[in-house]
């Protein structure tokens, strides 16, 4: 019979903690940026179809969702056991990606796939879009992963029908449709930018009613107030913004392919490429072991303000 002494127990405990620490680093590693154009061509060749309008955007939606589910450690937001439950950066990153997927899925269902407001919805997108709105932290059956896999299945069906000229599936690359999605993007980024910018606190004048004397709101607010993101939420907001930016830059690259004619006509192609370049900078390596909250011009860095910019 083997007797465990204190040094052996301490050594075993240290080894377990060390292995868990290494795995936590691996599971918290963020996915790389992939080549949207090359992926679109590769997927079209595998399916033996032509990459028609809408093929790139749908392909990116599928790839983003698969990456969310198949990256190191898998989808961990709904994992309730150690060490996953102690990892908060990656769940925040996943939620940022998920928000972009939800917004695009809704616009694809309501706008991109319909010629006008009274058009019939696409049957695959009708099923895919609600799957993305499933509870992102549910672990019991049906699990979150199974619902997102359903979304992928219906998007793959929609993509295949798009490439089939005999099918009724459509993707309308029009300026008004693109504007609908860009408005959703603007709201998401605006919210994230404000939460990042208030990492050091801001004294802000209330402009909620935009100076309209006849406007009203449900609850009166102070004329001036200080807004500050909680210290405990700094890293969560940072990584949520990082995940949203990672997903958005891929979606914009797909939009560049599918809406190329519209963008060229509106002289917006160069501006789009500059936006993509700015978003790529949000994916630079964070060398600090923690998200710092230094003042704007202080000695210590403020990662949230850098990300907001």
Image (spheres, helix red, strand yellow):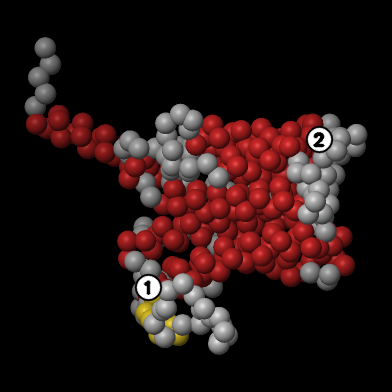
| Residue 291 % position (x, y) | 38, 63
State the residue at coordinates (42%, 34%): 139
| Residue 118 % position (x, y) | 80, 51
Counting residues from the start of the chain, the first of labels 1 and 2 encountered is: 2
| 3D distance between C-alphas at marks 1 and 2 | 48 Å
Q: Quadrant of the C terminus?
A: bottom right
* Quarter of the image where one finds residue 123: top right
Does residue 94 appear anywhere in the picture? yes
Q: Residues within 10 Å of mark 2 (few under 14, many from 20)?
A: some
| Residue 1 % position (x, y) | 11, 12
Q: Which mark is residue 228?
A: 1
Q: Residues within 10 Å of mark 1 (few under 14, many from 20)?
A: some
Residue closest to the eye, 250 or 297: 250
Establish if 14 lies above or below 191.
above
| Residue 84 % position (x, y) | 36, 40
Q: Which mark is residue 302?
A: none
**Is residue 112 left or right of 144 when viewed as pictured?**
right
Do callouts 1 and 2 mark residues in contact (Cβ within 8 Å)?
no
Establish if 97 lies above or below 144.
below
State the residue at coordinates (44%, 61%): 237
* Residue sitting farthest toward the top: 1
State the residue at coordinates (52%, 54%): 96
Mark 2, residue position: 161
State the residue at coordinates (48%, 39%): 75
Q: How many marks?
A: 2
For label 2, the SS is helix
Establish if 308 lies above or below 165.
below
Does residue 43 appear anywhere in the picture? no
Establish if 123 lies above or below 115.
above
* Residue sitting farthest toward the right: 166
For label 1, the SS is loop
């Amino acid at each position: 019979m083997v007797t465990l002494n204190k040094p052996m127990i301490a050594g075993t405990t240290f080894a377990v903690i060390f292995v868990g620490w290494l795995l936590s680093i691996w599971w918290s590693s963020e996915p790389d940026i992939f080549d949207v154009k090359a992926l679109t061509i590769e997927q079209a060749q595998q399916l033996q179809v032509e990459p028609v309008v809408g093929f790139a955007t749908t392909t990116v939606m599928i790839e983003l969702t698969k990456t969310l589910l198949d990256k190191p450690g898998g989808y961990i937001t709904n994992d309730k056991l150690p060490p996953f439950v102690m990892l908060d950066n990656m769940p925040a990153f996943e939620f940022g990606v998920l928000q972009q997927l939800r917004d695009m899925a809704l616009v694809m269902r309501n706008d991109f796939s319909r010629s006008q407001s009274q058009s019939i919805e696409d049957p695959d997108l009708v099923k895919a879009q609600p799957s993305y709105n499933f509870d992102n932290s549910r672990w019991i059956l049906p699990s979150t992963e199974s619902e997102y896999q359903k979304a992928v299945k219906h998007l793959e069906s929609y993509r295949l029908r798009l490439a089939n000229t005999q099918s009724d599936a459509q993707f309308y690359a029009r300026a008004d449709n693109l504007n609908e999605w860009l408005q959703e993007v603007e709201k998401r980024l605006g919210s994230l930018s404000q939460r990042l910018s208030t990492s050091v606190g801001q004294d802000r004048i209330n402009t909620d009613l935009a100076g309209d004397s006849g406007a009203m709101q449900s609850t009166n607010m102070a004329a001036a107030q200080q807004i500050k993101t909680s210290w405990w939420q700094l890293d969560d907001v940072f990584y949520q913004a990082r995940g949203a930016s990672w997903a958005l830059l891929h979606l914009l690259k797909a939009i560049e392919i599918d809406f190329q004619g519209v963008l060229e006509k509106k002289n917006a192609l160069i501006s789009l490429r500059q936006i993509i370049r700015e978003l790529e900078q949000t994916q630079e390596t964070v060398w600090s072991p923690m998200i710092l909250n230094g003042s704007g011009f202080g000695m210590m860095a403020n990662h949230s303000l850098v990300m907001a910019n």
